Image (cartoon, grey):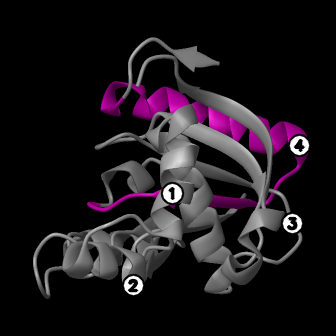
Amino acid sequence: MYWQTKGAANTRATVEAALKRAGELGLKHIVVASCSGKSAELLLGRAGDFNITCVTHQVGFYNPGEDEMPAEARKKLTDGGIRVLTATHLMAGLDRACRNKFGGVYPSEIVASALRILGQGVKVCVEIAVMALDAGAIPYGTEIVSLGGTAEGLDTALVIQPAHSQNFFDTKIKEIICKPREF
């Protein structure tokens, strides 16, 4: 399924398409990108059907010490059975620190740029799936549904079998459920 535009306008339809495909395939794990908690809230009430993990930006992503997800939103998600994972971004971290300090381009940023050829949402879906696997939020060797987006909201969903970060290139994108045609 291809959306004509990118971004938040596709959030509800992306969630619906992802849930439908997860159900068709009998998948039990969903990983969703959400910094404010708003996109993940659309999955509240589905935690009985799926193991849902919300992956946020790391604390300090934009401003030192700042957590973008309000405490109330985090509590609402966790009380609703959604695990919230806040960790260093797979394709940022030390490589970005080196770029910021010394200039140049580093391996994880090259991988991120290559994934963006298919759209920002594809990059986000791959990144958060690997982060969730590394954190033990999803089981190894299992296909999951991963939802990501461009800037705000959700516009991309993948069926993916992530590998741990040290074996990143063993990650398999099995299906693109939906993504924006223009990005």
Query: Magenta part mainly helix, strand or loop?
Result: helix
Mark pair 1, 2: CA separation = 14 Å
Residue position for label 3: 142
Amino acid at the residue labelled 1: Ile
Residue that lies at the very extreme toward the left in this rendered image: 63
Earlier-in-chain disc, 1 versus 2: 2
Dot label at residue 25: 4
Amino acid at the residue labelled 3: Thr
Earlier-in-chain disc, 1 versus 3: 1
| The N terminus, quarter of image | top right
Tag nearer the camera, 1 or 3 = 1
Horizontal side of residue 178 vs 40, given as left or right: right
Dot label at residue 94: 2
Tag nearer the camera, 4 or 2 = 2
Q: Is residue 124 visible?
A: no
| The C terminus, quarter of image | top left
Seen at 77% across and 44% down, the residue is: 22
- Image position, residue 95 (x, y; %): 41, 77
Amino acid at the residue labelled 4: Leu
